[in-house]
Image (tube, rainbow, N blue to C red):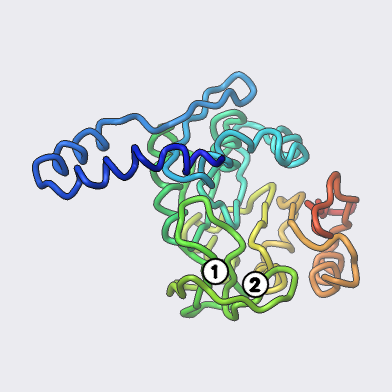
Amino acid sequence: MSLRKLTRPLISAAERAYRSPRWRRLMIEAREEFDDSVTVDAAGHPVRLRVSSRMEHARATGFLTKEPDTIQWLDRLAPGDLLVDIGANIGVYSLYAAVARGARVVAFEPEAQNFAALVRNIVLNGMGERISAWPYAIAAETGPIRLNLTAITAGGSQHAAGEAISESGERFQPAFVQGSMGIALDQALAAVADGACPRFIKIDIDGAEEAVVRGMTRVLARPELEEVLIEIAVEHSEAAPVYTLLEAAGFAPRPAAWVNKGRGNIIFARQP
C-alpha cells in the first residue's frame, strides 16, 4: 500500500478542517512556520533545500549519488571560477558549486515552479552573492517562447520548449503551456554577467540542446571556456548537429560515465 493511501484518512480530516476559516488560518500560520527544508552534507559543507513535493524530495536527497560524474566534474571548480548552469531546476548543482566549491554561478531556469524553488534555495543558503538566477529559456535567438510542461510541480522536468516533443522525439500532451522569454547565451551573458566567460557550462534541458549551442558561438570561441557538460544522446548519430557544432568549435567529447535510455552526460573539453 502506498504512503498516500495510508495517510488518506488523515489528509481527508485535514481537508475538512481547512474548510473552516478559523482552522484554515491556523493551518496556514503553522505551514508558514514549519521548516520544510532538508540539509545535505556536500563535501563537508551543509546545503539546505526546501522540499514541497515528491520531486523536490528526490532531487534534494539524491543529487549527490544520482549523477556522481556531475559531482566529480564540479569538484574541479576552484573558488571564484564561473559556472553557467542552463536548466538549473531547483538549483542542486548550482548550490553545490557555490557552497562546496566556492564558485560563482549564473543559473538559468525558465519553468515557473522550479525558478521559484531555485530562488528560495539560494536565499535559504545565503548564496545571493555567488549565484545569479534568471528565468530565461536559453535558446538560439531572443524572443517569446512556449514551454510545454509535463507537470505543475516544483522539481519537475522533461518540459519542452517550442513544440511539445520529448527528448526521445515523441509528441506529448502538455499539462500546461507556459510563456517564457528565450535568449541566446551570448546575449544573456553580455547582459547579466557583464560579458564574463565561464570556465564550465552545464546544459540539462531535455531536448533543445542544438538551439542552445547555436546561440553560444561567441562564448565557445573564448579561450577561458574549458568544458561543456551536456546531457544528450550518447549515440553520435542521434544528436549529430550538437556534436558537430561543438567539435567545430574545438571541443572533443569524452565517453559518458553512465547512460540512461540512450542519454548521458557528455563532457566536451577544449582541445589544445
User: Does the rendering let one see residue 210?
Assistant: yes
Q: Residues within 10 Å of mark 1 (few under 14, many from 20)?
A: some
Q: Which type of secondary structure does the marked residue at label 2 adopt?
A: loop
Which residue does the image show at 63% across and 39% down from the upper left? 81
Residue 125: image x %, image y %?
43, 32
Ranked by sequence position, the earlier of labels 2 and 1 is 1
Residue where numbered disc 1 is placed: 187
Q: Residue at x 62, y 46 (%)?
A: 83
Q: Amino acid at mark 1?
A: Gln
Question: Are the residues tagged 2 and 1 within 8 Å (C-beta)?
Answer: yes
Q: Nearer the viewer, residue 185 or 57?
A: 57
Pick the residue in front: 15 or 251.
Answer: 15
Q: Nearer the viewer, mark 2 or mark 1?
A: 2
Residue 203's x, y, as percent?
Answer: 67, 57
Near-viewer residue (51 or 173): 173
Q: Mark 2: which amino acid?
A: Gly
In the structure shown, which secondary structural element does the residue marked by tag 1 occupy? Answer: helix
Residue at (75%, 35%) from the top-left corner? Answer: 72
Which label is found at residue 65? none
The crowd level at tag 2 (other Cα within 10 Å; few <14, some 14-19, many 20+) is many
Q: Residue furthest left?
A: 22
Distance Cα–Cα, label 2 vs label 1:
8 Å
Left or right, residue 144 beside residue 198: left
Q: Is residue 134 left or right of residue 141?
A: left
The residue at which mark 2 appears reads as 215
